[in-house]
Image: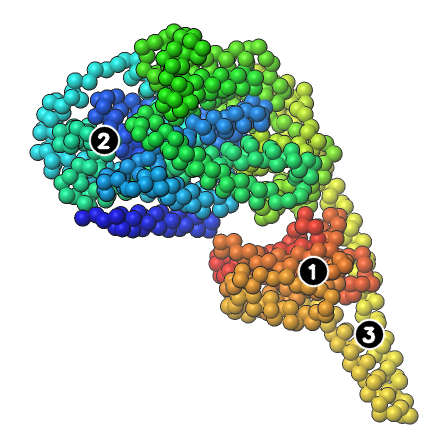
């Protein structure tokens, strides 16, 4: 006997298992051990998010009501995947090249990074997906009703399910911003759910065929004798639903998320093209037998959608019914989770961020935390989307067949198809045409199918449904333009998609694409032919540091600095910030698009660059269809870029050598002074000590001065010898094991700081154990702390020490609140002849950072300066184990 408490406990345990799987996958991915998480099998199983509660429960009910018509829902995706070379391959290639994050981002990016189109597609997706989320809530609620004869308040049960799904999605879908918008934990959890729901459906099927019936021959005989055998094919509806399922497979936000955004390798499509159709075949294998046995054994009043549950329960198979319940629960939860993540990404990127940018004005890219705005908006959006699904469930009454609700969503999201395919294959498509098609299609869908789904009297009166508005019969919602007798779904598909496509083509022919639209059109249509992407920016009066600050707000400090460092090295400017060339600006925009979408990324870069427009030369190059001219132009540009890069490298090298020469002269002068001063003091006071008339107190005073000067001289000589030993690799390391926090404690204590400098630390993050020479590491920390005390010019000097584990490495950042180091000196501060200009305040010979660099090299680590931190910032990076780094 399955009790209510047992069912709830099992559900919670299953959810806890999904939590554990998702958390484990996230940890693996964070450590870089995500090789098999990116396998084609995980990718193929993630596509099972297409098989929702509609498939698990509704397919059986569909078969009981309409015979083999349920197969249309599987035939569409199967056709798309078998022909993946035609559409899916191009779609995935475009997604990777353009850093696409959602279906709204795809349409927006194709048509000139249009914010307007992003908003339209986002709103359509939210409205179109709402019935589908309601379907999942209804299926879970109906499952509980089957077990316990109906809870006293099904709406309350649906509310609790909605809350649980929202919490899970927020925890593992919005923990951070991934530049590729990939969610390894969620995808892994969906793969597990794919196995569970397939196993559950097959288990029920085996039970029906070999327990309730006497094997395949008996079940075939029962099928022949059932009403399902008398089903007649309606050719128009069959074709219409097959087309609809194929289109929805491409356009559903959750399917676009797993098909395109979560795709780690284009070659995975080849595996999915045959593996996923086999999965669909397995899911549909026992649908008809279950439906036939349900019609034969269950009461005539029984809900066919729930035969998967009611058949095992009627035979007292509580364990099998529990497994079936988990299969349906998996189907519902996976859909809601992925759909919520996809829709939240669209809402934050295309609605929240544009509004926030407009409200912030020119300060949007340099003030505030953009990452926090994005994450918060996505969390709120996930909750709002689940609430909308719940409200639709409540308003619609939850009495509609599951298949009917699913078809309503399918028609809604299919309105994106004309703009998607037109943008991928027709360079003449324009933003105006896409907007016209989307608006017309969405309006016709809402009028003919979505609003009537609430029932007579809810939105449309019965009189309006029967006679049309104001008595105009040819405007009847389900007999538009006098075309009566069609199935409501097929009627809505024909008119909404047909008028959508017509408006799209007409609008494109009557308008002319902007330069950016033509550039994007060339990149989309010719994605396989263009060896390099056309550039949309021209160099203007822009500072690279402003771009870095903006990038850090979105990508995070580590990712942004890595991006800028790599770009600088490619430009031959290692140690400096890269030049804001058109190529770099385009790459930066694509990286930002991975987190905030194409339209928002374009707007944010445009705020800093000054919205530099596409040049006529760029447009001519992309529009040119002659391969010879394109190749010749590319060769000339490559040669010009190479000459420019070489000249810049020579100029930078000359500047650096000049600076080093000046620093060397200053060093020799300073070292002479530093050596002569203590030597002069020692000689002078030694002569004084020869005077026999000195008192004991005076002798003690002068001897103390001689001792202090000798210590000063010894320290200077020690630094010189230490640097020489480190540079020659002759140092003997004493490898020990200890925590970063303990080394910092010892270093701060040894620095003998006064009350001038305040140190901020997060001790909870410092409990990182390393295996290295702790004494040498402490020497580096002491030097950086003393530098902050000497050079920080703030009114209230403050040093922030931040420990950041990163896989097999750990980063320790020292960031003060001073004015920082000028860019011209950042590349020289680690040279042994280098000193900052304020010699009088600094003291010493300027060897500290040079020694630190050599120590970190011997420890198999690194030390570097972090630009763009509003103060002097140094990062010490070292491996957790020296032996591992040395291998």
* Image position of 51 (left or right of 181): left
State the residue in front, 860 or 806.
806
State the residue in front, 223 or 95.
223
Residue labelled with disc 3? 678
| Few, some or many residues within 10 Å of mark 1 (<14, 14–19, 20+) | many
Q: Distance between the residues labelled 2 and 3?
A: 98 Å
Residue labelled with disc 2? 303
Q: In front: mark 3 or mark 1?
A: 1
State the residue in front, 464 or 436.
464
Q: How far apart are marks 1 and 2 (CA)?
A: 69 Å
Q: Is residue 84 above or below residue 470?
A: below
Q: In this view, does 855 lie above or below 711?
A: above
Mark 2 or mark 1, which is nearer the start of the sequence? 2
Q: Distance between the residues labelled 3 and 1?
A: 33 Å
Residue labelled with disc 1? 798
State the residue in front, 278 or 625.
278
Number of the label disc, if any, that sits on residue 340: none
Evaluate whether residue 863 shows in this view. no
Residue 185 x, y percent position in the rendering = 41, 45
Q: Which residue is drawn at 9% across and 25% down?
A: 221
| Few, some or many residues within 10 Å of mark 3 (<14, 14–19, 20+) | many
| Numbered disc 2: secondary structure | loop
Q: Residue at x 31, y 35 (%)?
A: 139
* Image position of 799 (left or right of 626): right
Q: In front: mark 1 or mark 2?
A: 2
Q: Which residue is drawn at 30% across and 13% down?
A: 236
């Amino acid at each position: 006997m399955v009790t209510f408490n047992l069912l709830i406990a099992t559900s919670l345990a299953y959810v806890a298992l999904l939590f554990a799987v998702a958390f484990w996958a996230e940890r693996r991915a964070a450590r870089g051990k995500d090789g098999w998480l990116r396998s084609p099998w995980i990718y193929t199983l993630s596509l099972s998010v297409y098989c929702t509660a509609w498939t698990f429960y509704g397919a059986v009910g569909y078969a009981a009501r309409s015979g083999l018509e349920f197969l249309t829902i599987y035939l569409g995706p199967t056709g798309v995947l078998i022909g993946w070379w035609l559409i899916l391959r191009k779609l995935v290639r475009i997604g990777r090249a353009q850093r696409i994050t959602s279906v709204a981002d795809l349409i927006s990016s194709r048509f000139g990074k249009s914010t307007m189109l992003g908003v339209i597609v986002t709103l359509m997706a939210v409205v179109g997906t709402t019935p589908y989320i309601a379907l999942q809530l209804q299926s879970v609620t109906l499952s509980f009703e089957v077990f316990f004869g109906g809870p006293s308040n099904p709406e309350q049960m649906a509310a609790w399910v909605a809350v649980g799904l929202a919490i899970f999605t927020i925890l593992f879908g919005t923990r951070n911003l991934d530049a590729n918008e990939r969610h390894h934990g969620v995808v892994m959890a969906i793969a597990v759910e794919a196995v569970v729901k397939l196993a559950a459906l097959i288990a029920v099927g085996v039970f029906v065929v070999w327990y309730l019936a006497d094997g395949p021959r008996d079940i075939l005989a029962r099928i022949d004798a059932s009403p399902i055998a008398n089903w007649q094919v309606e050719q128009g509806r069959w074709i219409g639903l097959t087309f609809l399922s194929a289109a929805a497979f491409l356009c559903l936000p959750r399917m676009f998320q797993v098909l395109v955004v979560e795709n780690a390798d284009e070659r995975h499509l080849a595996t999915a093209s045959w593996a996923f159709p086999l999965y669909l075949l397995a899911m549909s294998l026992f649908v008809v037998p279950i439906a036939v046995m349900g019609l034969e054994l269950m009461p005539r009043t029984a809900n066919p959608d729930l035969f998967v549950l009611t058949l095992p329960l009627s035979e007292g198979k509580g364990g099998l019914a529990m497994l079936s319940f988990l299969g349906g629960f998996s189907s519902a939860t996976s859909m809601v989770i992925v759909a919520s993540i996809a829709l939240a990404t669209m809402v934050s990127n295309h609605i929240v961020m544009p509004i926030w940018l407009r409200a912030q004005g020119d300060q949007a890219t340099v003030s505030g935390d953009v990452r926090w705005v994005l994450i918060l908006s996505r969390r709120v959006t996930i909750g709002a989307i689940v609430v909308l699904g719940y409200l639709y469930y409540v308003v619609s009454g939850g009495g509609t067949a599951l298949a009917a609700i699913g078809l309503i969503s399918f028609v809604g999201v299919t309105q994106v198809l004309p703009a998607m395919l037109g943008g991928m294959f027709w360079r003449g498509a324009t933003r105006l045409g896409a907007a016209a098609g989307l608006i017309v299609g969405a309006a016709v869908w809402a009028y003919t199918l979505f609003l009537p789904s609430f029932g007579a009297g809810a939105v449309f009166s019965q009189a309006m449904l029967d006679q049309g508005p104001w008595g105009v019969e040819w405007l009847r919602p389900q007999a538009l333009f006098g075309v009566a007798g069609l199935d409501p779904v097929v009627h809505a598909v024909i008119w909404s998609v047909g008028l959508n496509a017509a408006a799209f083509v007409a609008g494109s022919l009557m308008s002319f694409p902007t330069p950016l639209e033509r550039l994007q059109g060339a990149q989309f249509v010719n994605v396989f032919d263009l060896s390099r992407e056309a550039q949309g920016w021209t160099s203007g009066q822009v500072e690279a540091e402003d771009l870095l600050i903006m990038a850090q707000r979105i990508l995070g400090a580590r990712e942004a600095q890595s991006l800028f460092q790599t770009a600088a090295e490619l430009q031959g400017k290692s140690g400096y910030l890269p030049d804001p060339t058109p190529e770099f600006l385009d790459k930066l925009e694509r990286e930002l698009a991975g987190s905030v979408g194409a339209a928002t990324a374009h707007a944010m870069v445009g705020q800093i660059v000054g919205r530099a427009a596409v040049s006529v030369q760029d447009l001519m190059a992309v529009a040119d269809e002659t391969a010879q001219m394109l190749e010749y132009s590319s060769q000339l540009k490559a040669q010009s870029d190479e000459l420019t890069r070489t000249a810049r490298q020579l100029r930078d090298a000359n500047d650096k050598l000049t600076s080093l020469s000046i620093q060397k002269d200053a060093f020799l002068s300073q070292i002479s002074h530093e050596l002569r001063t203590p030597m002069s003091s020692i000689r002078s006071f030694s002569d004084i000590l020869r005077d026999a008339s000195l008192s004991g107190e005076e002798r003690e005073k002068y001897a103390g001065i001689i001792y202090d000067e000798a210590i000063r001289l010894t320290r200077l000589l020690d630094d010189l010898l230490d640097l020489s030993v480190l540079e020659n690799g002759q140092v003997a390391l004493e490898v020990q094991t200890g925590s970063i926090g303990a080394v910092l404690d010892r270093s701060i204590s040894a620095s003998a700081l006064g009350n001038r400098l305040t140190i901020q630390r997060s001790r909870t993050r410092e409990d990182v154990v390393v295996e290295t020479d702790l004494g040498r590491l402490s020497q580096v920390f002491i030097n950086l702390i003393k530098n902050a005390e000497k050079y920080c010019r703030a009114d209230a000097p403050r040093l922030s020490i931040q420990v950041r584990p990163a896989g097999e490495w750990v980063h320790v950042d020292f960031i003060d609140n001073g004015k920082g180091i000028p860019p011209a000196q950042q590349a020289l501060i680690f040279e042994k002849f280098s000193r900052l200009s304020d010699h009088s305040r600094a003291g010493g010979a300027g060897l500290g950072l040079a020694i630190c660099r050599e120590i970190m090299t011997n420890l198999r680590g690194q030390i570097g300066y972090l630009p763009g931190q509003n103060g002097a910032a140094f990062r010490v990076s070292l491996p957790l184990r020296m032996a591992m780094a040395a291998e």
